[in-house]
Structure formats: C-alpha cells, structure tokens
Image: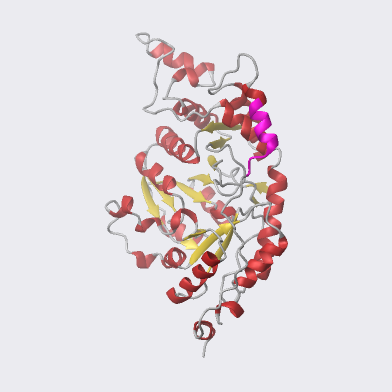
C-alpha cells in the first residue's frame, strides 16, 4: 500500500488545540495610533495628498533601494497605473503573466489595452516558469509581469538573461513580498517598475494603500500624472509642464489633462501610518523568515511540499501544497484547520488559477487548462495560513504536528 493510500485508510482523529489563528492579527500598534492622533491635532493640517505622502515616498524609496516612488490608494491602483503608463510610453502589446496572481494584475493588463499571455508556473517558486516564457515570446511581447507570490522570490538569472537578450521590459508585482531578496538586492528593483500593497493583511499596512517604484524618469513622470486624473500640473518636471502649456494655449494651465485617468491618490493619514510602520518592517520580516523556516522544517514532507526555493524569502503566509491529488485528503486537511480555528485560504494568491475566473472566460475561452498542470494542482490542493511576528515557535510546531501524517491517518 502506498503512502497516500495508507494516509487515507483510517478515520481522521483531529487534534483540537483551539489555536484561534486568524490570517492576520491587528498590526497597528499604540505607537501608530498615537502618531495619527498627534498628526490630526497639529494646526492647519492638510489631510489629502501632501507633505507626509512625499516623506513616505522618499523613505520607502530609500528602504527599497530605488530612486523614485509614488504612493497610491491600493496595490490594485499601482497595477492599473503601471500598465497604463506602459501603454502610453511603449504602446500596447502582449504582456506575459502568470495564472497564479491577484485579479488586478490581469485586469490592469486588459484595461490598459494589452493582451495577457499566460504561462504556467514553477511549483518550487510559484512564479512564471522561465523555460515557458521563452516559448511564449513573440514580436508583440512588450513585457513580463512577474508576481512574487506570498513572499517567495520569483526572479532567476535565466529570467534576467531572457529580458536582456530579448530586449523586453520587466514589471515586478511584489505586493505580497516586501523585503524578499535576489542576488543581494530587494525584489522590486530589477525591472522598469514595481508594485507594492499596504493592505491590512500584508507585511506592513497603511490600511489601504500601494506604491509604484521605479528608476525611470519618463515612467515616473507619466505615472505621477496618471495618479491624479492625468493632470499635467502633477508632473514633477518643469519641462513636461511647460511642454503641455505651450502646446495647449487655449487651456487653463492648471487643468490640462494629458491622459484619460482618474483619482488614485492616497491621504496624509495613510502616509503617517506608513511612515510609522516602515520603522518596524525589517524586524517583522526577519521574524517572518524565522517562522517560515521553522514551519517548513517541521511540516510532514511526505504529505506537503517543502522544497520551495526559499532563499531570500519574506513570507507573510505559511504555504501548504499537497504532494498528491486527493480531494479526500483535501477535506481532511481543511477539517483539521477548521476544528482548530485556523483561518486559511485555498488556492494561494488570488484564490488559485485565474484562468477559471468568470472575468476571463469570454476573453480566453480558447485556452486549454490541461496546458497549466502546475497551477491547476495549486488551485485545488493548496492553502495559505497567516504568518505574523506574534506567532510563537510552539504554536508553529503544534500546527505542524496537527497536520502530520500521524494525525491524518488516525
């Protein structure tokens, strides 16, 4: 009898430790709240996008190791602006994307007029498979939109060589991977631009918020205008503003709209919170790395995948992927998690395979899911569980014990 058959042969006997383990504990500290109160009580305070936003952008750029950043109201808005700016500067074309990502990565590609080209993922990194990227390249390829999933680094030397040799652009979605590293640099610094999210459940939070980061002046110029209705007065460069004013003498120079955009600004309050949270980000990342390694070291590798490419990871979630395709075992795992009050999400980032989502069925009806075996396995036989700095080593070891073969085969 094989291991899977042995595992499923008995009735499950659930270890009930009553973990009461949510995806995310409240990450907003007393220090954060006091900072907000002090800011609100300042005289003549401006609450909309202003000096605190600029300060947060500067501090974030310094932390990331890049020259320019733009604070927006969500990671999804960061995606939207990035794809619109890409279309404006380089024209529309094909964007290579993974089927395991958040919905806004794909919807931003479509809304900007690009065509998403899907390739399957590498199960050890949960990112686009470099070998399949080569097969997907065409003369219409504009960029690769790479997602760093749940804190795992998605970059490889092969991928960077493809980008250089084929002269195509790289966009990094690091919304779930603040502080992940590759070749001694933080992810989000390798391409034309990168996107980050500060949603409540991520590494640090502004409650809602996102960031676009880049070293490219033209991209930065266009993206800054797109953040605020496409207004030329939002350009950081005098030469840009003067160009539009001279070309449109019939328009009020304060109301020249260069692009069809809308309001994706954030507020001073969100920036104040971001500045406070950023001061603790490095220590939180180190604790999460420790937690993730402890989790992988104690997880039953006969049942679950544990051989991830985890060097430089910055995981805000614990990853569970069944080695075998078994809906019966899927049910058993979820029963263990539910009885122990451990909140989870099946399918990892974005709920699994985006190709199964209603918003894509008409657009991509010709795609055969059989060509995406890795993400299809992830879709049905994976979960993530919250990893935050307040979790203790004993809790992690107890969780792994609850998910061990010894428990599941009883």
Is 32 in the magenta? yes
Q: Is residue 250 above or below residue 186?
A: above
Where residue 190 sits, quadrant-wise, is top right
The residue lying at 54 percent from left, 69 percent from top is 336
Q: Is residue 409 left or right of residue 293?
A: left
Which quarter of the figure has residue 289?
bottom right
Residue 168 point in image, percent of width and height: 48, 46
Left or right: residue 386 versus residue 372 is right
Image quarter in which the C terminus is found: bottom right
Q: How is the model colour-coded?
A: secondary structure
Q: How many marks?
A: 0
Looking at the rendering, the stretch of residues picked out in magenta corresponds to 27-37
Q: Is residue 62 visible?
A: no
Between 50 and 78, the residue placed more toward the observer is: 50
Residue 115 versus residue 239 in the image, above or below: below
In the rendered image, residue 351, in percent from the top left (x then y), is placed at 44, 56
Q: Main secondary structure of the magenta part?
A: helix
Q: In this image, 27 relative to 72: left or right?
A: right
Look at 46% across and 72% down and name the residue there: 331
The residue positioned 59% from the left and 53% from the top of the image is 151
């Amino acid at each position: 009898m094989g291991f899977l058959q042995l595992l499923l042969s008995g009735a499950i006997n659930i270890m009930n430790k009553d973990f009461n383990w949510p995806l995310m504990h409240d990450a907003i500290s007393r220090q954060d709240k006091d900072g907000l109160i002090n800011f609100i009580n300042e005289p003549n305070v401006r609450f909309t996008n202003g000096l605190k936003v600029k300060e947060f952008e500067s501090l974030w750029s310094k932390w990331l190791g890049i020259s320019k950043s733009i604070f927006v109201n969500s990671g999804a808005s960061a995606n939207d602006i990035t794809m619109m700016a890409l279309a404006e500067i380089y024209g529309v074309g094909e964007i290579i994307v993974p089927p395991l990502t958040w919905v806004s990565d794909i919807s931003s590609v479509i809304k900007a007029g690009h065509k998403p080209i899907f390739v399957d993922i590498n199960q050890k990194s949960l990112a686009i498979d470099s070998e399949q990227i080569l097969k997907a390249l065409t003369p219409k390829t504009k960029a690769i939109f790479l997602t760093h999933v749940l804190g795992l680094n998605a970059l490889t030397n092969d991928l960077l060589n493809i980008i250089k040799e084929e002269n195509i652009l790289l966009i990094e979605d690091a919304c779930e991977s603040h502080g992940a590293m590759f070749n001694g640099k933080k992810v989000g610094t390798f391409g034309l631009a990168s996107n980050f999210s500060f949603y409540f459940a991520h590494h640090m939070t502004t409650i809602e918020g996102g960031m676009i980061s880049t070293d490219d002046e033209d991209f930065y110029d266009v993206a800054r205008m797109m953040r605020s209705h496409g207004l030329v007065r939002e350009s950081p460069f005098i030469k840009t503003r003067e160009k539009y004013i001279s070309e449109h003498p019939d328009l009020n120079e304060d109301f020249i709209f260069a692009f069809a955009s809308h309001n994706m600004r954030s507020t001073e309050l969100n920036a104040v919170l971001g500045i406070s949270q950023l001061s603790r980000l490095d220590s939180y990342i180190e604790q999460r790395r420790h937690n993730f390694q402890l989790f992988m070291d104690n997880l039953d590798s006969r049942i679950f995948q544990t051989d991830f490419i985890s060097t430089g990871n910055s995981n805000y979630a614990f990853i569970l992927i069944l080695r075998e395709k078994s809906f019966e075992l899927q049910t058993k795992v979820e029963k263990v998690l539910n009885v122990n009050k451990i909140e989870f999400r099946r399918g990892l980032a974005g709920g699994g395979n985006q190709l199964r989502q209603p918003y894509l069925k008409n657009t991509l009806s010709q795609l055969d899911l059989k060509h995406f075996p890795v993400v299809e396995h992830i879709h049905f036989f994976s979960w993530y569980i919250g990893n935050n700095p307040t979790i203790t080593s004993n809790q992690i070891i107890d969780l792994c014990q609850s998910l061990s073969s010894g428990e599941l085969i009883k």
